[in-house]
Amino acid sequence: MAVLETGDEVIVPEPCFVAYQPTVIFAGGSPVSVPTYVSQDFQVTVDDLEKARTPRTKAVLLGYPNNPTGAVLERSRLAEIAEWAEKHDLLVVSDEIYDRLVYGVEHTCFSSLPGMWERTIVLGGFSKSYAMTGWRIGYAAAPPAILAAMRKIHQYMIMSAPTTGQEAAIEALKSAEPYVESMRQEYDRRRRTIVDGFNRLGLDCFEPKGAFYAFPSIKSSGLSDQEFSERLIMEEKVAMVPGSAFGQSGAGHVRASYATSLQNIEEALNRIEGFLKKLRA
């Protein structure tokens, strides 16, 4: 709402967090979806973005590390997008809520790239890296003029973030760093377990490098992602989200969260194995 005029277009790579397109619409803009696929490691390219650009394009909304795929955009590809955005005078809204949860790679903050400080809105928060989901403490970093406009809107939409959550966030910044790294290492262990498990079961799984989701293909099951998810929860009490909920390029996949215990992950894999045996019998 602080940066869009009615009818402005925002390019949104998919699969993506389900709120992205509705947020653009709520702000008066028009989302333009750009599909990415496992064949490209779910990484959007400048060519993909350029094909979607029109004279009405105002911004690009990037969500990396990605929910639902776990993809992390390579620094070289981010740099290409930055150069393209500057060339066409576009804003970049970069949702980096999972920035601390990466594995075997480094996260690059988009606004740190040359020329991007002036045209980037970085979104972050404490829900993921500090395990404060539900406390609703987030933040935005942007050029002063954009932040001033955001504050004007914010003060009429919400009183403030919860005071207890603010106090907890301050304490997290002061003393939680060792726990963040310990949690990241544990997520990495669970990540390898669930990805290896899916591949062992014949559900080809792209290796996620960030966040805490795996995004296996379920095409070998012969079911759609919707059917697979519904039957799995009804028959085996294992919950996963159909990939098509995150955009049509997510069809044929399901999202599985490994933000649970290793014991639960192993039990879920055992139940999925039994489910697949019944399907293939």
Image (cartoon, grey):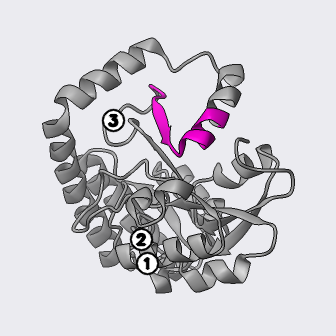
Q: Are marks 1 and 2 in contact (CB under 8 Å)?
A: yes
- Amino acid tagged 1: Arg
> Looking at the picture, does residue 210 appear above or below residue 262?
below
Quadrant of the image for the N terminus? top right
Give me the residue at 37% from left, 42% from top: 128
- Amino acid tagged 2: Leu
Residue assigned mark 3 = 131
**Which residue range is magenta in the image?**
135-149
Q: Residue 251 placed where, x, y %?
A: 62, 72
Whole-Å distance between the Cαs marked 1 and 2?
A: 7 Å
Give me the residue at 43% from left, 78% from top: 77
Q: Residue 134 placed where, x, y %?
A: 46, 28
Whole-Å distance between the Cαs marked 3 and 2?
A: 23 Å
**Of label 3 and label 2, which has the lower sequence position?**
2
Q: Residue 144 placed where, x, y %?
A: 55, 40
Q: Secondary structure at mark 1?
A: helix
